[in-house]
Image: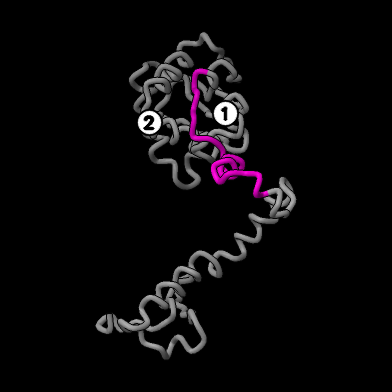
Amino acid sequence: VEQLSLTVEITYEFLGEYRNIELKEGGSQIPVTIENRAEYVSCYISYQMGDSIRQEKDALMKGFSLLIPPNLAVLNLFQSSELELLLVGTTELDFEVLEELCDYEGGYNSQYRTVRWFWKTVHEMTLEQKQKLLQFSTGSPRAPVGGLKELKFKLQRAGPDSHQLPSAHTCFNTIILPDYNSEEKLRRLLLYAINNCQGFFLE
């Protein structure tokens, strides 16, 4: 451990500048050794799971308290899995229901050729691909509480056939889909879009 030349502090980069934070008082002067490595790990975890995200955690708890009063007795009524469901939604994805309830704009309807190709492609996707499709179109890979039947999903026509990738308005759970001239082209470009949707150029 001594060969690592660690001290009881943490170093991180912020806007190109390296900053040090002591994990305990005088930590910058305390080398990490075999004898105090357990304490170092404990301090490190405490910082990463607590102090470093305190602002975000406080904001989360403030929002959470709007749904459930900050009363320990009330929280004890919930299992951890139920709280997770409330906070992040469900991983159960029923795309058959989503297709039934989907709205259409720009000339699309449930019987339109491109729309039928779209849903055929979706139903043939793996679970991971379906989660990516949700992430692409809604901003979250999970369904809301109550499942996909609670999601107001929309397909909007984006003009005639082109080489343009599908795009999305995540605030409105809407996929903007060009009127592709083949199922193969739709599948290829849709999969490319959902697998490369980091940043602002697709969403």
Residue 63 spot, x, y in % from top left: 69, 51
Amino acid on which the number 2 mark rests in the picture: Leu
Using residue 112 as the reference point, say whether residue 76 is left or right of it. right
Residue 180 screen position, x and y as percent? 42, 20
| Front residue of this view, candidates 146 and 17 | 146
Q: Residue furthest top?
A: 111
Please say if 76 is above or below 113: below
Q: Quadrant of residue 13?
A: bottom left
* Model colouring: one colour
Is residue 165 visible in the rendered image? The answer is yes
Residue type (three-letter) at the residue carrying disc 1: Gly
Q: Label 2 belongs to which residue?
A: 191
Q: Is residue 68 above or below residue 151?
A: below
- Within 10 Å of the Cα at label 2, are there few (<14), some (14-19), or many (20+) other Cα atoms? some
Nearest-to-viewer mark from 2 and 1: 1
Q: What is the quadrant of the N terminus in the image?
A: bottom left
Q: Is residue 183 above or below residue 14?
A: above
Q: Which residue is mark 1?
A: 147
What kind of element bears circle 1? loop
Q: Is residue 106 magenta?
A: no
In space, the residues marked 2 and 1 are separated at their CA atoms by: 23 Å
